Amino acid sequence: MRERTSRSRCIALFGVMLATTTLGMAQVTFEQLSFEEAQAKAQKEGKIIFVDVMRSGPPSDHNKHVEEQVFTLDSISNFFRDNCVSIRMDMGSEAGKAFVPNLNMLMYPAYVFYDAKGAQLQYTNAYAVMEDPTVLMQKARASAAVAAEKKTNTRSIIFADGSWAAVLQQAKTSGKLIFLDAQTEWCRPCRMMERDVFTLDRVADFYNGQFINISMDMEKGDGPELVKQYGIMAYPTYLFIDGDGNVVHQDGGFMEADRFIAVGQKALQARGQANQYHAEPGILFSEDGTWESLLQQAAVENKLIFLDGYAVWCGPCKTMDREVFTREEVGSFFNQTFINVKRDMERGEGIALKERYNIKAYPTYLFINAKGEEVHRIVGSSSADEFINKAQIALQPENQLAALNQRYASGDRSATFIQQYLKALSMAYRQDEAASVATAYLDALPRADLITEINWTLATSYLTDPNSSVLGYLAVHRDELRGVGVENGDEAIENLFSKGFHRLFAGDGTFDERAFKKTRATIKKCRLPHADELIRLAKLVEAGKTANWKNYIKLLDNVVSKRLTVYGQSIPVSLSVFAGKMLRETSETYASNVLGWADTLLATMDHALDRAKLYDLKQLAYQQTGDEEKAKLASAESKELVAQWSKENSGSGMMMAIPMKLQ
């Protein structure tokens, strides 16, 4: 689902990666094995399987970045060596075509984890990992934990047989609620729940003890009538129904075990039944009292206030509420240590607090003293143990962000402190400040000192300005990067330039036209392998930032007519990204150009998903011109192509997970 662009960014940060982590010679090792051979090896060695699912052809900019900057991290390569059998799967090969059913309709390229029996566990993609490398480790650890739990499970939810009328009568006689798993044969999340959640001992014990369970195909038998009776519109839908046929609670979709149990608990609470399964309470939050009264309470109790700044639409906020704040060890620590407060940052007193403490992303967790001063900040979600560790820093005055700010302001520029400070700024989601601190620190170093493991890591982690003199120096001396474990200096430098250009294109940072032209000259002078593609990207960014739409159109004309590549992107993706931006900024002025480009490519491209992207672009162009009828037709074409791709590639008839762009 596309996030709202008018609201603060909602982010999820999993795991922790120390700023002192350096790039060494470590590397995730991919073995030349088939998926079946990887299963056999994983079974023998007690490991899970990690599959880098690739499209044929050169890797994307994102995938190259992960290969160079993430797979080479010691913590990741060591974990994967000890816990994973890692393979690559080219989806254009015969082996790739045979592998398609194992994707369960996931879009690729992707990183996917499986257990030794071939059951899909967690998955992510290169873009998510490039934005936050800790995502990969979080997915790997979660997959290993689920696989380990599944090995020891022997029970599953017991579903009743018989007609709906018989189940209602049983519920009326026993006084229990019915748990109705409303599913269909073709539904991918339904099959995943059956395989990965219903078969867990703790789930089975809870549902078998509390409910009369029945799973029904909504397209067969009593199913169609139940669809009409209860207005079921999506699958899976979970209905909790009393003996009179009344729905007391409803939920749906794939969910992990803890959340699925919590859904059942809510049904019991809605019915007014005692929930004997409920564990010890987690964090006890107060949503009452004014902010000033809470500050007074903090002074009396000599405690810090822990403020959970959330928004009702924020997914990671709900994840933390559901999976971390409910943990007994988290509740024990926070309830004893802090005054815990929740505030919706878009309602009531939360609006003023958002402004006062400059909250820009959700969830944001603030630790505030009795004077109302922020002493520490955490942004994004974490595992329970990591969240406790991060919160403990708030109790260490010398390590609080406020204290680190003062040290920096007083002139401390030691290497150890800068690494600590950058880590704290990143944890507080102050990315612009982190970039500024890192750039100033690296700029002040003798140029020869830039090429060390520590400083190269700082550059790759925090440099965001493509016009940086540090990046220019590293580009000229990229061959020396081998000495700090970088095997392909060309790709590493190209990725840094690309990251900076895309950041400017997205609207972040200040555009300096004079410096930008100098950077283009540096790229050309350095003779980078993909200099032409990078310069093409830079020219598009420059034309867009200066609203030089005449030159912008000329560049895109060349991309389409001459089939020129913009660095790290396929032609349909490039057109979708850059033409889409022009449409949004100029409305219908250049819609005819965009429609012409899309039609030109549609006449020559066969891949269903590439064609779907182009129809999405046509839909946007028609919307800008006010032609809603043609926009609907283009949207229908896109959906039909996605459905066609799903049918041709699934081999199982299960429901496809629609990609964000096309959803």
Image (cartoon, rainbow, N blue to C red):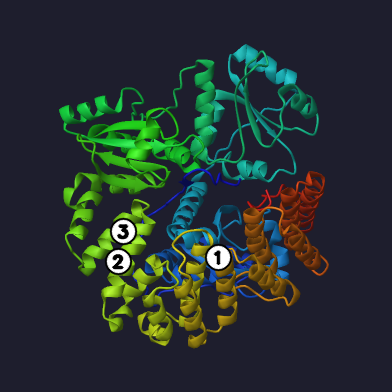
Q: Residue at x 70, y 75 (%)?
A: 558
Quadrant housing residue 306? top left
The numbered disc on residue 546 is 1
Image depth: mark 3 or mark 2 in front: 3
Q: Give amino acid for label 1.
A: Thr
Residue at mark 3: 423
For residue 221, side relative to residue 118 (left or right) = right
Image position, residue 642 (x, y; %): 75, 54
First reached walking from the N terminus: tag 3 or tag 1: 3
- Could you tell me if residue 417 is visible in this image? yes
Residue at mark 2: 20
Q: Give amino acid for label 2.
A: Thr
3 and 2 marks in contact (CB < 8 Å): no
Q: Is 237 in front, or is 243?
A: 237
Image position, residue 487 (x, y; %): 45, 82
**632 is higher (above) or lower (below) than 271:** below
Asked which secondary structure carries label 3, the reply is helix
Quadrant housing residue 301? top left
Alpha-carbon span between mark 2 and mark 1: 39 Å
